[in-house]
């Protein structure tokens, strides 16, 4: 088996806690920066598995305070306090600008007295920014790897994420027991930045499929066809896709509670767009999809779920 595939591992939710209970020698102190629904549920999962979650931090202090009280962690108002309180720090922030600020912002940042610390960055960010952060961490005597997630909120809580790792293999192997408690499958991709490239491709294809499904259902509705029948036909033909399972009902019912926000879909399609430009490629489907999500943001619906792209394709909606 190729070296890059050696660390793929299946861990079922039913066995995860049993595995952790026998791993009492691991006393790593863990912190989280960015405790929205993904980060908070990752913290809850590791707390359930018996790990010490010592500190949390978020731009929403009330959100961080609530989670800190729930899991017995310290709500740190300063980033340097997070680093001082933990050995391993997970970051789950919204975009490149937020990531740059927490690692390289003037005054308070995570790299203050960070020697020996390990940072695991789980947000979907540009590969270049991941490399920049890893270099800054190395200069501070710390380590940073990618833990790109291709899953959603419920998987974060259940420990069934699909995690793609980029960065130094030795650092990955040191943190692997922790990462295994968070994932149903763990995939080592390669050097820093490579996991972000793969994650950009995953989200690019997912977003295109979502926009395509919205157009298919929108046209079917305009033709007066029964949408449940259409979904059944799609599921049994070449029109089938994962997003048919996750988004079709929400598109029909106009239920767009955010599991993956439209503004994040725009950001991630934009990362793929930038990578394509760097590679000298034109990706018209991705470009058109990003334009749809950009339009959702323009009309004030960027914080709805990505399924809200159907609001642009069904007749009589806006």
Image (tube, helix red, strand yellow):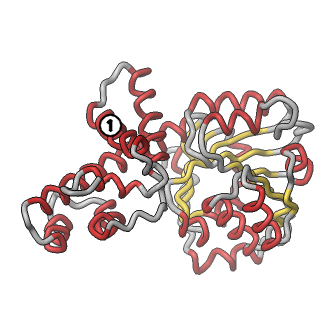
| Residue 25 horizontal side relative to residue 215, left or right | right
Image height check: is 4 above or below 45? above
Residue 41, given in percent of the width and then of the height, sits at 65, 66
| Residue 10 horizontal side relative to residue 57, left or right | left
- Asked whether 250 or 275 is in front, the reply is 250
Image height check: is 312 above or below 237? above
Which residue is drawn at the image coordinates 32% and 37% (left, top)?
A: 286
- Asked whether 292 or 89 is in front, the reply is 292
Quadrant of the rendered structure where residue 255 is?
bottom left
Which residue is drawn at the image coordinates 58% and 53% (left, top)?
A: 7
Which residue is drawn at the image coordinates 40% and 54% (left, top)?
A: 306
Residue, disc 1: 286
* Mark 1, other Cα within 10 Å: few <14 / some 14–19 / many ≥20: many
Residue 264, given in percent of the width and then of the height, sits at 49, 46
Which residue is drawn at the image coordinates 43% and 57% (left, top)?
A: 305
Q: What is the total number of numbered labels drawn onto the structure image?
A: 1
Callout 1: SS: helix
- Asked whether 228 or 49 is in front, the reply is 228
Residue 211, given in percent of the width and then of the height, sits at 29, 49
Residue 140, given in percent of the width and then of the height, sits at 85, 31
Image height check: is 107 above or below 218? above
- Asked whether 25 or 130 is in front, the reply is 130
| Residue 46 horizontal side relative to residue 266, left or right | right
């Amino acid at each position: 088996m190729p070296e890059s595939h050696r660390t793929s591992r299946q861990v079922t939710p039913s066995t995860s806690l049993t595995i952790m209970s026998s791993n009492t020698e691991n006393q790593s102190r863990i912190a989280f920066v960015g405790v929205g629904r993904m980060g908070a549920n990752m913290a809850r999962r590791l707390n359930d598995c018996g790990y010490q979650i010592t500190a949390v931090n978020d731009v929403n202090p009330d959100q961080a305070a609530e989670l800190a009280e729930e899991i017995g962690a310290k709500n740190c108002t300063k980033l340097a306090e997070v680093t001082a309180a933990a050995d391993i720090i997970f970051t789950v922030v919204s975009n490149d600008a937020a990531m740059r600020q927490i690692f390289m912002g003037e005054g308070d940042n995570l790299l203050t007295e960070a020697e020996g610390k390990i940072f695991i960055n789980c947000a979907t960010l540009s590969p270049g920014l991941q490399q920049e952060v890893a270099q800054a961490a190395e200069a501070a005597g710390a380590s940073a790897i990618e833990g790109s997630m291709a899953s959603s909120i419920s998987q974060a809580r259940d420990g069934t994420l699909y995690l793609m790792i980029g960065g130094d293999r030795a650092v990955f192997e040191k943190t692997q027991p922790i990462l295994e408690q968070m994932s149903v499958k763990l995939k080592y991709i390669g050097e820093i930045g490579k996991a972000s490239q793969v994650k950009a491709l995953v989200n690019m294809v997912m977003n295109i499929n979502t926009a395509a499904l919205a157009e298919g259902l929108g046209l079917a509705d305009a033709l007066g066809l029964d949408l449940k029948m259409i979904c059944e036909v799609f599921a049994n033909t070449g029109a089938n896709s994962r997003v048919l399972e996750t988004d079709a009902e929400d598109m029909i019912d106009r239920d767009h509670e955010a599991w993956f926000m439209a503004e994040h879909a725009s950001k991630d399609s934009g990362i793929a767009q930038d990578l394509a430009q760097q590679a000298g490629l034109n990706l018209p489907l991705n470009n058109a999809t990003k334009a749809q999500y950009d339009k959702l943001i323009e009309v004030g619906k960027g914080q709805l779920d990505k399924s809200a792209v159907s609001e642009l394709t069904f007749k009589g909606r806006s």
